[in-house]
Amino acid sequence: MKKILLLTIIIVLLSACGKSDESTNSSSEDVIKPIEAVLDVPEKLDVNEAVTLSVTVTQDEGVVDDASEIEFEVWKNGEKEESKMIQANHQKDGVYTAEKTFDENGIFYVQSHVTARDMHTMPKAKITVGKVTKEAGDTKEADKETSEHHHHSNTTIDFQIPETVKVNEASAYVAKITHKGEPLENALVRMEVWKDESKKHEYVNLNEAETGTYQIEMKLDDKGTYHITVHVEKDEIHTHKEFEIETE
Protein backbone atom coordinates (compact mmCIF):
# COMPACT_ATOMS: atom_id res chain seq x y z
CA MET A 1 0.00 0.00 0.00
CA LYS A 2 2.83 2.39 0.91
CA LYS A 3 4.57 1.55 -2.39
CA ILE A 4 1.41 2.38 -4.34
CA LEU A 5 0.98 5.66 -2.48
CA LEU A 6 4.63 6.60 -3.12
CA LEU A 7 4.32 5.74 -6.81
CA THR A 8 1.18 7.88 -7.08
CA ILE A 9 2.96 10.87 -5.53
CA ILE A 10 5.90 10.50 -7.93
CA ILE A 11 3.57 10.39 -10.94
CA VAL A 12 1.73 13.51 -9.77
CA LEU A 13 5.01 15.39 -9.26
CA LEU A 14 6.35 14.38 -12.67
CA SER A 15 3.07 15.42 -14.27
CA ALA A 16 3.21 18.83 -12.57
CA CYS A 17 6.81 19.35 -13.75
CA GLY A 18 5.83 18.46 -17.30
CA LYS A 19 2.97 20.96 -17.27
CA SER A 20 5.24 23.63 -15.81
CA ASP A 21 7.82 23.09 -18.58
CA GLU A 22 5.09 23.08 -21.20
CA SER A 23 3.69 26.35 -19.85
CA THR A 24 7.13 27.94 -19.85
CA ASN A 25 7.85 26.86 -23.40
CA SER A 26 4.47 28.07 -24.59
CA SER A 27 5.01 31.48 -22.98
CA SER A 28 8.43 31.78 -24.59
CA GLU A 29 7.06 30.92 -28.03
CA ASP A 30 4.34 33.57 -27.68
CA VAL A 31 6.94 36.35 -27.55
CA ILE A 32 7.22 38.04 -30.94
CA LYS A 33 10.84 38.83 -31.72
CA PRO A 34 10.97 42.27 -33.40
CA ILE A 35 13.34 43.02 -36.23
CA GLU A 36 15.95 45.71 -35.60
CA ALA A 37 17.17 48.06 -38.31
CA VAL A 38 20.20 50.29 -37.72
CA LEU A 39 20.50 53.04 -40.32
CA ASP A 40 24.06 54.20 -41.06
CA VAL A 41 24.50 57.44 -43.02
CA PRO A 42 26.93 60.36 -42.55
CA GLU A 43 25.74 63.50 -40.76
CA LYS A 44 27.47 65.80 -43.27
CA LEU A 45 28.40 65.60 -46.96
CA ASP A 46 29.85 67.79 -49.69
CA VAL A 47 27.73 68.55 -52.74
CA ASN A 48 28.17 65.88 -55.45
CA GLU A 49 29.92 63.56 -53.00
CA ALA A 50 28.88 59.92 -53.49
CA VAL A 51 27.74 58.17 -50.34
CA THR A 52 26.74 54.64 -49.38
CA LEU A 53 23.40 54.43 -47.57
CA SER A 54 23.43 51.41 -45.29
CA VAL A 55 21.04 49.63 -42.96
CA THR A 56 21.82 46.55 -40.87
CA VAL A 57 18.89 44.26 -40.10
CA THR A 58 18.83 41.74 -37.25
CA GLN A 59 16.32 39.72 -35.27
CA ASP A 60 16.97 38.26 -31.84
CA GLU A 61 20.73 38.94 -32.25
CA GLY A 62 20.83 37.03 -35.54
CA VAL A 63 21.33 38.61 -38.98
CA VAL A 64 18.39 38.94 -41.35
CA ASP A 65 19.55 38.11 -44.87
CA ASP A 66 16.10 37.29 -46.29
CA ALA A 67 14.31 40.65 -46.11
CA SER A 68 11.27 40.91 -48.38
CA GLU A 69 12.06 44.46 -49.46
CA ILE A 70 14.35 47.28 -48.37
CA GLU A 71 14.28 50.77 -49.86
CA PHE A 72 15.78 54.13 -48.93
CA GLU A 73 13.44 57.11 -49.19
CA VAL A 74 15.30 60.41 -49.68
CA TRP A 75 13.87 63.92 -49.63
CA LYS A 76 14.95 67.51 -49.10
CA ASN A 77 13.79 69.22 -45.94
CA GLY A 78 10.22 70.47 -46.41
CA GLU A 79 9.74 68.56 -49.71
CA LYS A 80 8.55 65.16 -48.49
CA GLU A 81 5.98 64.91 -51.29
CA GLU A 82 8.84 64.88 -53.82
CA SER A 83 10.81 62.08 -52.16
CA LYS A 84 12.65 59.47 -54.21
CA MET A 85 12.84 55.74 -53.45
CA ILE A 86 16.12 53.85 -53.94
CA GLN A 87 16.20 50.05 -53.94
CA ALA A 88 18.75 48.53 -51.54
CA ASN A 89 20.86 45.44 -52.24
CA HIS A 90 21.93 42.84 -49.71
CA GLN A 91 25.68 42.67 -49.20
CA LYS A 92 26.32 40.22 -46.33
CA ASP A 93 25.58 39.68 -42.64
CA GLY A 94 22.24 41.48 -42.83
CA VAL A 95 23.72 44.66 -44.35
CA TYR A 96 21.73 46.31 -47.18
CA THR A 97 23.13 49.26 -49.13
CA ALA A 98 22.47 51.71 -51.95
CA GLU A 99 24.53 54.49 -53.53
CA LYS A 100 23.38 58.11 -53.65
CA THR A 101 24.85 61.46 -54.71
CA PHE A 102 23.37 64.73 -53.46
CA ASP A 103 23.77 67.46 -56.07
CA GLU A 104 22.67 70.53 -54.10
CA ASN A 105 23.08 72.24 -50.75
CA GLY A 106 20.48 71.62 -48.09
CA ILE A 107 19.18 69.44 -45.30
CA PHE A 108 18.03 66.02 -46.45
CA TYR A 109 16.29 63.11 -44.76
CA VAL A 110 16.94 59.44 -45.41
CA GLN A 111 14.39 56.88 -44.22
CA SER A 112 14.93 53.17 -44.70
CA HIS A 113 11.78 51.13 -45.28
CA VAL A 114 12.61 47.65 -44.03
CA THR A 115 10.16 44.81 -44.63
CA ALA A 116 11.26 41.44 -43.26
CA ARG A 117 9.67 38.39 -41.66
CA ASP A 118 6.16 39.87 -41.73
CA MET A 119 7.24 43.09 -40.00
CA HIS A 120 8.04 46.61 -41.15
CA THR A 121 10.17 49.32 -39.54
CA MET A 122 11.31 52.74 -40.77
CA PRO A 123 14.34 54.34 -39.07
CA LYS A 124 15.16 57.86 -40.25
CA ALA A 125 18.26 60.09 -40.24
CA LYS A 126 19.20 63.62 -41.28
CA ILE A 127 22.08 64.64 -43.58
CA THR A 128 23.46 68.14 -44.05
CA VAL A 129 24.80 68.59 -47.59
CA GLY A 130 27.20 71.41 -48.40
CA LYS A 131 26.62 74.87 -46.99
CA VAL A 132 23.23 75.40 -45.38
CA THR A 133 21.91 78.82 -44.46
CA LYS A 134 19.77 79.35 -41.39
CA GLU A 135 16.76 80.03 -43.61
CA ALA A 136 17.28 76.79 -45.56
CA GLY A 137 17.27 74.71 -42.40
CA ASP A 138 14.41 76.57 -40.73
CA THR A 139 11.47 74.72 -42.35
CA LYS A 140 8.26 73.28 -40.99
CA GLU A 141 9.72 69.78 -41.02
CA ALA A 142 12.72 70.81 -38.96
CA ASP A 143 10.39 72.49 -36.46
CA LYS A 144 8.24 69.37 -36.32
CA GLU A 145 11.28 67.18 -35.65
CA THR A 146 12.31 69.46 -32.79
CA SER A 147 8.80 69.60 -31.36
CA GLU A 148 8.26 65.84 -31.42
CA HIS A 149 11.47 65.05 -29.60
CA HIS A 150 12.05 68.11 -27.36
CA HIS A 151 12.70 66.88 -23.79
CA HIS A 152 12.06 63.22 -24.69
CA SER A 153 14.85 63.00 -27.28
CA ASN A 154 16.34 60.12 -25.28
CA THR A 155 13.22 57.98 -25.79
CA THR A 156 12.85 56.06 -29.06
CA ILE A 157 9.89 54.13 -30.45
CA ASP A 158 10.69 51.37 -32.93
CA PHE A 159 7.25 50.26 -34.11
CA GLN A 160 7.01 47.07 -36.14
CA ILE A 161 4.16 47.34 -38.65
CA PRO A 162 2.95 44.03 -40.17
CA GLU A 163 4.05 43.47 -43.76
CA THR A 164 0.44 42.96 -44.86
CA VAL A 165 -2.75 43.68 -42.93
CA LYS A 166 -5.91 41.93 -44.08
CA VAL A 167 -9.39 42.90 -43.00
CA ASN A 168 -10.72 40.85 -40.06
CA GLU A 169 -7.47 38.89 -39.69
CA ALA A 170 -5.39 39.26 -36.54
CA SER A 171 -2.00 40.88 -37.10
CA ALA A 172 0.84 41.29 -34.61
CA TYR A 173 2.05 44.77 -33.68
CA VAL A 174 5.33 45.15 -31.80
CA ALA A 175 6.87 48.29 -30.27
CA LYS A 176 10.43 48.31 -28.99
CA ILE A 177 10.89 51.23 -26.58
CA THR A 178 14.29 52.47 -25.40
CA HIS A 179 15.26 55.35 -23.10
CA LYS A 180 18.84 56.61 -23.06
CA GLY A 181 19.86 53.55 -25.05
CA GLU A 182 18.34 51.04 -22.61
CA PRO A 183 15.06 49.07 -22.93
CA LEU A 184 12.26 50.93 -21.14
CA GLU A 185 10.38 48.52 -18.87
CA ASN A 186 7.05 48.80 -17.08
CA ALA A 187 5.82 51.63 -19.28
CA LEU A 188 2.25 52.26 -20.38
CA VAL A 189 2.33 51.72 -24.15
CA ARG A 190 -0.89 52.30 -26.07
CA MET A 191 -1.95 52.43 -29.70
CA GLU A 192 -4.45 55.10 -30.67
CA VAL A 193 -6.18 53.76 -33.80
CA TRP A 194 -8.59 55.42 -36.19
CA LYS A 195 -9.64 55.06 -39.80
CA ASP A 196 -9.04 57.82 -42.31
CA GLU A 197 -11.66 60.60 -41.95
CA SER A 198 -13.23 58.92 -38.90
CA LYS A 199 -13.78 60.81 -35.65
CA LYS A 200 -13.84 57.63 -33.57
CA HIS A 201 -10.47 56.86 -31.95
CA GLU A 202 -9.86 53.58 -30.14
CA TYR A 203 -7.09 52.94 -27.60
CA VAL A 204 -5.42 49.53 -27.25
CA ASN A 205 -2.87 48.72 -24.54
CA LEU A 206 0.21 46.71 -25.56
CA ASN A 207 1.57 44.00 -23.26
CA GLU A 208 5.23 43.87 -22.26
CA ALA A 209 6.45 40.52 -23.60
CA GLU A 210 10.13 41.15 -22.83
CA THR A 211 11.93 44.06 -21.19
CA GLY A 212 11.22 47.08 -23.39
CA THR A 213 9.30 45.07 -26.01
CA TYR A 214 5.52 45.55 -26.11
CA GLN A 215 3.12 43.68 -28.36
CA ILE A 216 -0.51 43.01 -29.19
CA GLU A 217 -2.56 41.17 -31.81
CA MET A 218 -5.39 43.18 -33.31
CA LYS A 219 -8.00 42.96 -36.08
CA LEU A 220 -9.07 45.85 -38.30
CA ASP A 221 -12.55 45.47 -39.73
CA ASP A 222 -12.53 47.80 -42.76
CA LYS A 223 -10.48 48.20 -45.89
CA GLY A 224 -8.55 51.45 -46.29
CA THR A 225 -6.08 53.71 -44.52
CA TYR A 226 -5.69 53.55 -40.75
CA HIS A 227 -3.72 55.94 -38.56
CA ILE A 228 -1.88 54.64 -35.50
CA THR A 229 -0.27 56.79 -32.83
CA VAL A 230 1.92 54.90 -30.37
CA HIS A 231 1.85 56.58 -26.95
CA VAL A 232 4.52 55.86 -24.31
CA GLU A 233 4.12 56.99 -20.69
CA LYS A 234 6.26 56.38 -17.62
CA ASP A 235 7.03 58.85 -14.82
CA GLU A 236 8.21 62.04 -16.56
CA ILE A 237 8.25 60.36 -19.99
CA HIS A 238 5.27 61.09 -22.21
CA THR A 239 5.95 60.82 -25.91
CA HIS A 240 4.31 59.50 -29.06
CA LYS A 241 4.93 58.67 -32.70
CA GLU A 242 2.52 58.44 -35.64
CA PHE A 243 2.21 55.77 -38.35
CA GLU A 244 -0.09 54.80 -41.22
CA ILE A 245 -1.10 51.38 -42.51
CA GLU A 246 -3.23 50.11 -45.38
CA THR A 247 -5.60 47.16 -45.01
CA GLU A 248 -6.32 44.77 -47.84
Image (cartoon, rainbow, N blue to C red):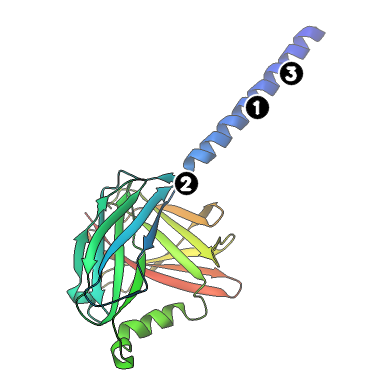
- Where residue 167 appears, as percent x and y from the top left, is 26, 52
Label 1 neighbour load within 10 Å: few <14, some 14-19, many 20+: few
- Where residue 29 appears, as percent x and y from the top left, is 48, 39
Q: CA distance from mark 1 to mark 3?
A: 12 Å
Q: Residue at x 37, y 73 (%)?
A: 43
Left or right: where does residue 216 sit relative to residue 120?
right
The kind of residue on which mark 3 rests is Ile
Left or right: where does residue 77 sit relative to residue 187?
left
Task: Judge by depth and name the residue closer to the eye, 210 or 68.
Answer: 68
- Where residue 54 appears, as percent x and y from the top left, is 32, 59
Q: Which residue is mark 3?
A: 9
- Label 3: which secondary element: helix
Say whether marks 1 and 3 touch (CB < 8 Å). no
Task: Judge by depth and name the residue closer to the eye, 47 or 150.
Answer: 47
Q: Note whether 68 is above or below 130 in the view shown.
A: above
Q: CA distance from mark 2 to mark 1?
A: 30 Å
Q: Which residue is mark 1?
A: 17
Q: Nearer the viewer, mark 2 or mark 1?
A: 2
Q: Earlier in the sequence, mark 2 or mark 1?
A: 1
Q: Note whether 58 is above or below 156 in the view shown.
A: above
Say whether marks 2 and 3 touch (CB < 8 Å). no
